[in-house]
């Protein structure tokens, strides 16, 4: 069955002439006035509208509510490069292919109810297959005599039939297998949390009705996987109270190990908070769909068919509510096996295989390690602490975190593994080589490029994301020294991949640039875990410094598109009023600082005298107000043509930044 709109589009497509250039639109039409109208048409049985509807739902993974609440028309268009369906800001390409009408597959096997028995059975099959056949994933005790040690506390879910209430178990060093849970706490901040008093009472039992829905669903899945124990952070760690966070400090330092040793991680990807639940109703699977011929009256054996979409692993998982959390980056990278209960599909991820409901035997990638970033956990040289660490931090700082002081603890598990693999020392989110080597000890400038011994210098080369979407601030409590990216709540960048401008780390990676700063000494004071929370830090740097810089607001972007990008508070700040130079303040509140100094970090050794290229990159500093002679970082500066030579004659000396 076709609605009148889809019949008209089929006729339009069959009669249109090819466009002259591939990017030109061959035709474009309004399919329905709103997504609601499209949904009604799909409900009445239009087979094409059902496909269009599914495309839009899968394309709106990051913001599904925008479809339901939006009142914008649904457009469809064809270019020489293919077809597109759009609604508001959501636009997605649809697939076409020539198929023999006798070989059309049936409905896609995606169940509209995430809690369907078939899904839980599929999850169990994936887990069993991995434990038996994937030695690279590690047995985790499932088919091995070497079961890991249980976490300090776990939840005993009882027998698979649910005949007993769950209860808290103190493991006392016992070994066994267990499941872990990744979930969003959300704004509701559920009240079911472990306290000193509950440690005793919960050992007798925990009423399922007292648990938030996400926890109840996770316990149900654990039982169906024939596992006895599950670890849930808020039920197994005594939650901090004023004056007592000792259990959290101790257990938080073990969280990386807990996720790494779990037999499987249940990821509540679709749940925005603990009350939302793991099991969702899949809107995209509401109606069955099959490949559909665009020209309905074409009786040829082979024709051009519109192919229904499949839920995409990357979009469904990476853009889901769960993966906007900073903590989940570590949980996902360290877990050997994950069941992603995403909004529109169930996905499986292990070191060997990625799979889904629609491709249960595996899909997409030959080597998932390259996609998830877990290769960083196997590297044994400085690539782990620089080349791979920088993009990981860029990803991490784009994610949300409820407590500012969790910034370093939420990465501690990854940091601990990198330290063990490489021998590099960890300081407030940056890495120091165990081998010390000053700039003067290198035979040539070429040897400085990407040098392992300069890893800490490279780690200092970051800046706040200058785009308007970023709203950086300092933490409400002490988190890290000002020279660390962890001292900023907001997105930061090492590279130029997403900024539209230069990346600070090019001073270490680019052959046209030369590193000019030596790190003489660095130290940080840890609360308990050397890879977690700290109370202080300082770094001593030897380089040239120039005082007397000031920042002025420029009324409009300079140099057309070359510098036309939004920055903090819509304005770019340029040192000394020169258009080809700017300073990106670490946080918005510091843009009111009238004067600052620039500590030289790298220089462009291939810059032509008449070139508009950057000449220097530098850390913007101001003296600390305590009179100790130390400095604090306030931003990152790029100095161009008008500042060329400004560091000539400046004596290299030692400066301490806190």
Image (tube, rainbow, N blue to C red):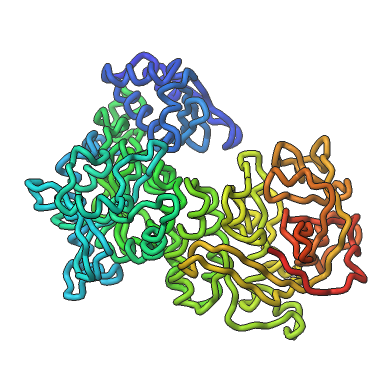
Q: Is residue 310 visible?
A: no
Specify whether 261 is left or right of 245: left
Specify whether 109 is left or right of 379: left
Residue 216 drawn above or below residue 373: above
Residue 78 on image: x %, y %:
49, 29
Residue 401 drawn above or below residue 302: below
Residue 559 on image: x %, y %:
82, 43
Q: Quadrant of the C terminus?
A: bottom right
Residue at 41% from the left image edge and 64% from the top image edge: 253
How many dots with numbers?
0
Residue at 58% from the left image edge and 67% from the top image edge: 430
Residue at 33% from the left image edge and 35% from the top image edge: 308
Q: Is residue 382 visible?
A: yes
Residue 110 on image: x %, y %:
24, 39
Residue 553 on image: x %, y %:
82, 40
Q: Quadrant of the N terminus?
A: top left
- Residue 624 found in image quarter: bottom right
Which residue is nearer to you in this view: 476 or 424? Answer: 476
Which residue is nearer to you in this view: 649 or 630? Answer: 630
Specify whether 614 is left or right of 124: right
- Residue 118 found in image quarter: top left
Residue 335 drawn above or below residue 570: below
Residue 173 drawn above or below residue 161: below
- Residue 40 found in image quarter: top left
């Amino acid at each position: 069955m076709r609605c009148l709109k889809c019949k008209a589009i089929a006729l339009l497509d069959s009669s249109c002439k090819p466009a002259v250039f591939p990017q030109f639109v061959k035709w474009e039409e309004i399919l329905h006035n709103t997504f609601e109208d499209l949904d009604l048409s799909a409900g009445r049985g239009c087979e094409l509208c059902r496909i269009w509807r599914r495309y839009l739902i899968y394309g709106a993974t990051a913001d599904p509510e925008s479809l339901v609440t939006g009142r914008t028309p649904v457009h469809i268009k064809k270019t020489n490069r293919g077809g597109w369906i759009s609604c508001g800001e959501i636009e997605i390409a649809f697939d076409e292919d020539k198929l023999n009408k006798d070989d059309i597959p049936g409905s896609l096997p995606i169940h509209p109810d995430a809690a369907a028995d078939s899904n839980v059975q599929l999850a169990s099959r994936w887990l069993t297959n991995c434990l038996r056949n994937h030695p690279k994933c590690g047995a985790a005790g499932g088919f091995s005599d070497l079961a890991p040690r249980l976490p300090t506390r776990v939840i005993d879910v009882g027998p698979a039939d649910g005949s007993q209430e769950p209860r808290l178990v103190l493991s006392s060093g016992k070994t066994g297998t267990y499941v872990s849970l990744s979930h969003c706490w959300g704004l509701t901040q559920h009240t079911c949390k472990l306290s000193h008093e509950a440690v005793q009472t919960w050992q007798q039992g925990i009423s399922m009705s007292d648990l938030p829905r996400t926890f109840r669903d996770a316990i149900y899945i654990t039982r169906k996987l024939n596992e006895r124990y599950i670890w849930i952070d808020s039920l197994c760690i005594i939650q901090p109270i004023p004056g007592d966070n000792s259990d959290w400090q101790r257990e938080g330092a073990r969280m990386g190990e807990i996720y790494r040793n779990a037999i499987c991680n249940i990821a509540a990807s679709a749940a925005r908070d603990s009350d939302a639940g793991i099991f969702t109703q899949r809107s995209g699977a509401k109606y069955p769909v099959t490949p559909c011929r665009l020209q309905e009256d074409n009786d040829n054996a082979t024709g051009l068919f519109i192919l229904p979409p499949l839920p995409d692993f990357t979009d469904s998982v990476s853009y889901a509510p769960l993966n906007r959390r900073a903590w989940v980056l570590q949980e996902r990278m360290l877990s050997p096996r994950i069941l992603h209960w995403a909004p529109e599909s169930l996905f499986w991820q292990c070191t060997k295989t990625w799979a889904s409901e629609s491709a249960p035997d595996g899909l997409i990638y030959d080597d998932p390690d390259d996609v998830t970033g877990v290769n960083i956990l196997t590297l044994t040289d400085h690539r782990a602490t620089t080349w791979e660490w920088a993009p990981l931090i860029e990803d991490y700082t784009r994610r949300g975190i409820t407590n500012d002081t969790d910034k370093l603890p939420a990465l501690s598990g990854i940091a601990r593994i990198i330290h063990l693999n490489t021998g590099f020392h960890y300081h407030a989110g940056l890495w120091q080589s165990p081998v010390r080597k000053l700039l003067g000890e290198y035979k040539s400038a070429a040897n400085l490029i990407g040098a392992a011994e300069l890893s800490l210098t490279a780690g200092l080369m970051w800046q706040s994301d200058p785009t308007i979407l970023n709203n950086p601030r300092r933490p409400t409590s002490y988190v890290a020294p000002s020279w660390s990216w962890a001292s900023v709540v907001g997105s930061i960048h090492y590279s130029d991949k997403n900024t539209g401008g230069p990346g600070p780390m090019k001073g270490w990676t680019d052959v046209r640039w030369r590193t000019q700063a030596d790190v003489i000494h660095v130290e940080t004071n840890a609360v308990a875990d050397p890879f977690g929370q700290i109370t202080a830090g300082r770094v001593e740097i030897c380089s040239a410094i120039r005082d007397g810089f000031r920042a002025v607001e420029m009324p409009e972007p300079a140099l057309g598109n070359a510098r036309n990008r939004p920055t903090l508070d819509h304005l770019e700040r340029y040192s000394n009023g020169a258009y080809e130079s700017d300073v990106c303040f670490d946080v918005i509140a510091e843009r009111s600082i009238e004067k600052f100094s620039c500590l030289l970090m790298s220089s462009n050794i291939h810059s032509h005298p008449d070139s508009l290229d950057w000449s220097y990159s530098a850390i913007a500093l101001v003296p600390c107000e305590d009179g100790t002679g130390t400095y604090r970082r306030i931003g990152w500066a790029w100095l161009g043509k008008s500042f060329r030579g400004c560091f000539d004659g400046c004596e290299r000396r030692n400066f301490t930044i806190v």
